[in-house]
Amino acid sequence: MTAIAPVVPLPGDNRLGSILADLSAKGWSWQPGLLPEALYHALRAEVLAINAEDDLAPAGIGRESNFQLDRTIRKSRISWMDGSTPAQADFLQWAEQLRETINRRLMIGLFEFEACFAVYRPGEFYDRHLDSFEGARNRVVSLVVYLNEDWPAENGGALIVWPEGSDETAEPAAHILPERAGVVFMLSETVPHAVEMTHATRVGIAAWWRVNPSIQGQIDPLA
């Protein structure tokens, strides 16, 4: 039987090797232009339409009973992906291939994926934080995808990444501009990061791979 080729192929072995080596060595990896061109255009068109229709929810912090909207910590808007459009379906398939590769090479047991479009309008930001919620090992590897065309430094909105496991006195390891089709990978539990205030509308995707924690036989619900 002939295997069915993936709709959106993964990057080559050298690029994948660089991502995996970075995650192993320092807990994060910046990959400019990693998102395939056709997928970039499809996802960008979708998030711009969602933003134009204002079909976005304020982003919060915490989960379940601890969920809260704190606009002094996080000020942005999101729309959860459910795979219901061709662009979303292709992106989820691309992410699934990445999950399989990361699991096979690093053996960290990624199980479940959640993703949302993330929009920062002028004046919005997200203070320093970890992506894994306190009290549960849920999000393990974070994925950030940028869907902006041209992004000069004066637009702000950089992703600030601190060294793995560092406290608030540490110097940042990187300031990453949200450049076209760029992708960031981070270990969710140990790599602190923040989004600087943006001065232009900043669009992208925030996503996470989770392990399979369960409560009384039920997979820990998404927040």
Image (spheres, rainbow, N blue to C red):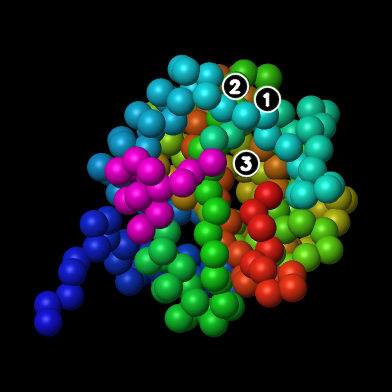
Is the magenta region chiefly helix, strand or loop?
helix
Marks 2 and 3 close (CB-CB < 8 Å)? no
90 in the magenta segment: yes
- What residue is drawn where x is 77% and y is 49%? 64
Q: Secondary structure at mark 3?
A: strand
Looking at marks 1 and 3 on the same chain, the residue that comes earlier in the sequence is marked by: 1
Q: Secondary structure at mark 2?
A: loop
- What residue is drawn where x is 19% and y is 66%? 5
Q: How dense is the environment of label 2, judged by Cα within 10 Å: few (below 14), some, or many (20 and up)? A: some
**Cα–Cα gap, marks 1 and 3:** 13 Å
**Cα–Cα gap, marks 2 and 3:** 15 Å
Q: Which residue is mark 1?
A: 124
Q: Quadrant of the N terminus?
A: bottom left
Q: Of tags 1 and 3, which is closer to the observer? A: 1
213 or 26: which is nearer to us?
Answer: 213
**Disc number placed over residue 159 in the picture, else none:** 3
Marks 1 and 3 close (CB-CB < 8 Å)? no
